[in-house]
Image (cartoon, rainbow, N blue to C red):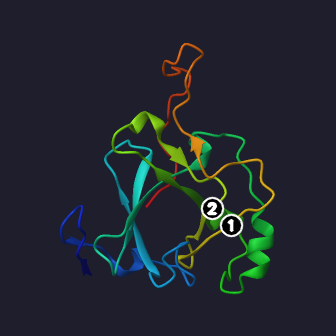
Amino acid sequence: MKIDTTRFGPITIGKEKIITMPFGMLGFADEKRYVILQHRENSPFFWYQSVDDPALAFVITSPFLFEPGYSVPIDDTLEEMSWIEEKDKGTLELYVVVNIPSSSPDNMTANLIGPILINNRTNQAVQMVITDSPYSHKFPLVRKNKDNTRDSQNKVREPTAGG
């Protein structure tokens, strides 16, 4: 299948790669079909590209690369969402949307209270809204030391899963 994208031009993807979101993304309820595109080799970032709107794409990443103890209550979401047929958590992936300010990429943040839960067996997804969370929608991905320099301990590893 050929899709048009603003960032990458026309690309060809297999129909089996299309992820359906019955409720869309927050603020984009009418956009229901997406595909995950690799940003570049060995990058922890991916593009969550709309199949139907060439200009709509979100930067996403695995939250566990930046917050290894990240935990969200997915059991409630699985029970509430009847369209998720597979209860096997091994088929699920979790991503978060990243905001990268164009003038200051070191100030990039991730929305840890609105993760995207993807079922890889059914290729369906939902953007969760986590209430009463210790996390933020502006979780800093680049931590600074006390002297305002980048923390060298905060190195990003290559993700183990992706599209």
The local secondary structure at tag 1 comes to loop
The circle drawn on residue 114 is: 2
Give residue 45's position: percent from left, percent from top: 42, 49
Give residue 12's position: percent from left, percent from top: 24, 73
Quadrant where the N terminus sits is bottom left
Residue ranking furthest to the left: 9
Residue ranking furthest to the front: 103
Mark 2: give few (<14), some (14-19) or many (20+) Cα within 10 Å.
many
**Residue ID for mark 1:** 129
Q: Left or right of 57: which side holds 1?
A: left
Give residue 134's position: percent from left, percent from top: 77, 47
Question: Which image quarter: residue 115?
Answer: bottom right
| Relative vertical location of residue 49 with respect to residue 152 in this rendering, above or below | below
The residue that appears at 62% across and 52% down in the rendered structure is: 137
The residue that appears at 57% across and 18% down in the rendered structure is: 145
The earlier-in-sequence mark between 2 and 1 is 2
The three-letter code of the residue at mark 2 reads Gly
The three-letter code of the residue at mark 1 reads Val
Quadrant where the C terminus sits is bottom left
Badges 2 and 1: C-beta atoms under 8 Å apart? yes
Give residue 76's position: percent from left, percent from top: 80, 71
Q: Left or right of 119: which side holds 71?
A: right
The local secondary structure at tag 2 comes to loop
Q: Nearer the viewer, residue 140 or 123?
A: 140
The residue that appears at 41% across and 54% down in the rendered structure is: 46
Q: Left or right of 163: which side holds 23?
A: right
Residue ranking furthest to the top: 147
Gap between marks 2 and 1 measured at Cα:
5 Å
| Relative vertical location of residue 33 with respect to residue 102 in this rendering, above or below | below
Q: Left or right of 10: which side holds 14?
A: right
